[in-house]
Image (cartoon, rainbow, N blue to C red):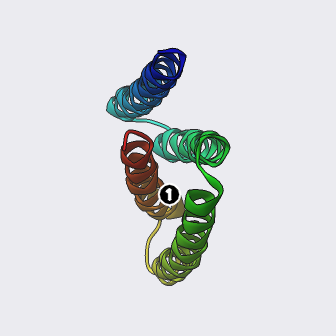
Amino acid sequence: MRNLILILTTFLCTTAYSQSRQTALDTLEARYQRCLTQGHHTYGCALTYYKQLDSLLYTTLQHLYASLTPNRQLKLQTEQGTWEEKKEEFFKKMDERVEKLHKSTLNGLDDDMISTDNKAAYLKVRVTALLDLDTE
């Protein structure tokens, strides 16, 4: 009976934690959209959103590593390494694209904003996948 209560408590805590992370993700997205609708400093909006997503990604990973069995930790570590490599490749392409566009556009910040927004979207996909993994 004690084990059942412990398992149930652990499950409920993990579920509540995942829901709070999802709420945090939704809040970041809403705040970003509000910032963009103001119509100025869009690069600053995108940069702040990117940094906040990066932070959420880090804390979500830390929580997962702490809550998984050693075998699942190793699997996640391998998956994360593969994802990091793909992320670096994607970010490099984004940066190269911006460099090319800077030569032909007047306002480079628009290009930087779009690139940063794409990078943030890439992070958001990973955070969402990790949140789904956390609820398994």
- Considering only vertical position in the picture, is 117 above or below 34? below
* Residue sitting nearer the eye, 104 or 58: 58
> What residue is rendered at 42% in x and 42% in y?
131
Disc 1 marks which amino acid?
Thr
Q: Along the horizontal axis of the image, is 96 left or right of 36?
A: right
Residue 57: % across, % down: 57, 47
Residue 110: % across, % down: 44, 57
In the picture as drawn, the residue positioned furthest to the front comes out as: 1
Residue 29: % across, % down: 38, 34
* Residue sitting nearer the eye, 108 or 120: 120
**Screen quadrant of the C terminus:** top left
Q: Along the horizontal axis of the image, is 54 left or right of 98?
A: right
Residue at image mark 1? 116
* Residue sitting nearer the eye, 111 or 130: 130
Classed neighbour count for the residue bearing mark 1: other residues with Cα under 10 Å, few (<14), some (14–19), many (≥20): many
Q: How many marks?
A: 1
- Considering only vertical position in the picture, is 17 above or below 86? above
* Residue sitting nearer the eye, 39 or 49: 49
- Considering only vertical position in the picture, is 111 above or below 128? below
> What residue is rendered at 51% in x and 61% in y?
112
**Quarter of the image holding residue 121?**
bottom left
> What residue is rendered at 62% in x and 39% in y?
63
Q: Secondary structure at mark 1?
A: helix
**Quarter of the image holding residue 34?**
top left
Q: Along the horizontal axis of the image, is 31 left or right of 71?
A: left
